[in-house]
Amino acid sequence: MTMLATLLAAIVLASPNVTPSPYDESVETRDESSTDGVNDPGTNDSTSGQQAEYRYDPMCSPGDGSDSTCSLAYNCPEGQVRYNIWRRLPGQDWVWMGDDCLGGAPADDETVPAVTAGDVLREVRRLPLPKAQLAIQPSDRTLVNLDTVFSTTAPKFDRTVTILGQRVRIIAKPTRYAWHFGDGATLTTATPGRPYPAMDVTHQYTKADQTHRPRVDVTFSISYSVDGGPTQSLAQTITTEGPAASLTTREATPVLVD
Amino acid sequence: MTRVGTALAAAVALLSVSACTGEEPAGGDPTTSAPSPRATPSPTPTPAAPTIPPEATEHSADGAAAFVKYWNQVFNYAVPSQDTKQLSEISAPDCSACNAMIRFIDGIREGGGSSQSPDYRTTVTSTRVVNGTFMVAARHESSSYRFRESSTSDESLVRAATYRYIYELTWLGNRWLVEAIRKQERP
């Protein structure tokens, strides 16, 4: 092989592999079977050999929305509402197919869209869950090397919301309390603690003249029921971080009195 | 100049052009190419971590659109810097696409690899609301870029391309979070 040929071969060998974007491959794709767009409302299609479901969510019902973006939903002919159209193959997530103006409400015989755990989780995050206020005894200032008592009131969350046109009751139950005492120490309990004289949750600070920012984070388990149906639980818990209080530590000095 | 010297100059010029344009030289076969030299892909200057613009913190359609642009600025920063902390903070824990991207970047860092920035240039084409979830359709034009997954792997080239995604955003009461990213095949 001549030197020139060797050099050119080296150039070829040094060329990089051309590859699809690894980030694009990370993004979920809709089903691979067709690019047929939106089928007729209410129909199934089986272009991939699997039955696809469709559902329709009004972007915003005229007169019902307060969000400024509702204006996007109003550019339909008189009497029609703009719907987002979703499609799902068995075992897969809903995929947005586009939107369309349709006359009035969807036909009665259309399948009522299922409220999924993901729908509920998204709604809970949007609401969002309450934060726990910390009660400290003694409050504001405490003494080092003595028990300081912490407690909170179990936050309650019981709301009924509308998801995909169905009434969904969501109940969040506190299941874990993570106490952050502000000096690096933490404690996890299953109960919210009680005020003094109970000593359920206590902590002793060791350094005087420090200001700490204790707080309590609450982890909730979520259950929900759709249109009065059976109660279901989300596998995922949600934790809310409580607001920090302010607590200064002092050292007690013995004083002789007459 | 001798014939060999001329060839060498031509080869150097060819390599230079290739590096500048990011295009594969003719004859390159991705399936048969041998390991290339272990040089690190020419790093694009790593920009400073982006700061969130005020409009991207507003609970509105414009705010959602601004947030998607910001998310992609953070992505453009995370890839070459290999710093995924900020990207994680603005992505939901169960956003599978976000997690896959973050894992890929983390994997490059942990393997001693490197990457140029995809340099996504983002245009928001629409923003819609479905039951409180904001759906932002966006188009990204990327530059061609090179990356090496680890210190021992071959260099890979991703050609310039256009990607269309739909971002699902959740409003947490005081800020946005990317809940999901899906491909948009029918904008």
Image (cartoon, coloured by chain):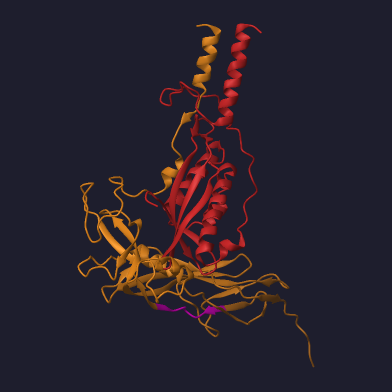
Chain colours: A orange, B red
Quarter of the image for residue A56 reads bottom left
Side of A65 relative to B72 (left or right): left
Q: Is residue A118 above or below residue B153?
A: below
Work out whether residue A78 or residue A111 is closer to the camera in this orientation and state it.
A78
Above or below for B96 versus B108: below
Q: With A61 as the anchor, is A113 left or right in this view?
A: left
| Quadrant of the snapshot with the N terminus of chain B | top right
- Image spot of residue B27 (x, y percent): 46, 20
> Is residue A28 at least partly visible in the picture?
yes
The residue shown at (52%, 67%) is B59
In the image, the segment drawn in magenta is: A150-158
Query: Is residue A155 within the magenta segment?
Result: yes
Q: Residue at x 44, y 69 (%)?
A: A70
Q: Is residue A157 rendered magenta in the image?
A: yes
Rendered position, A5 above or below B143 = above
Which residue is more in the foreground, A254 or A177? A177
Q: Position of residue A154 (x, y in %)?
A: 47, 79
Furthest residue to the front? A78
Count of marks, rendered view: 0
Q: Is residue B163 above or below residue B43?
A: below
Query: Residue at point 26% right, 73% down?
Result: A230
Whether residue A234 is visible here, answered yes or no, is no
Percent from the top left, x then y, of residue A231? 29, 72
| Towards the viewer: A58 or A243 | A58
Task: Depth check: give the residue in front, A162 or A182.
Answer: A162
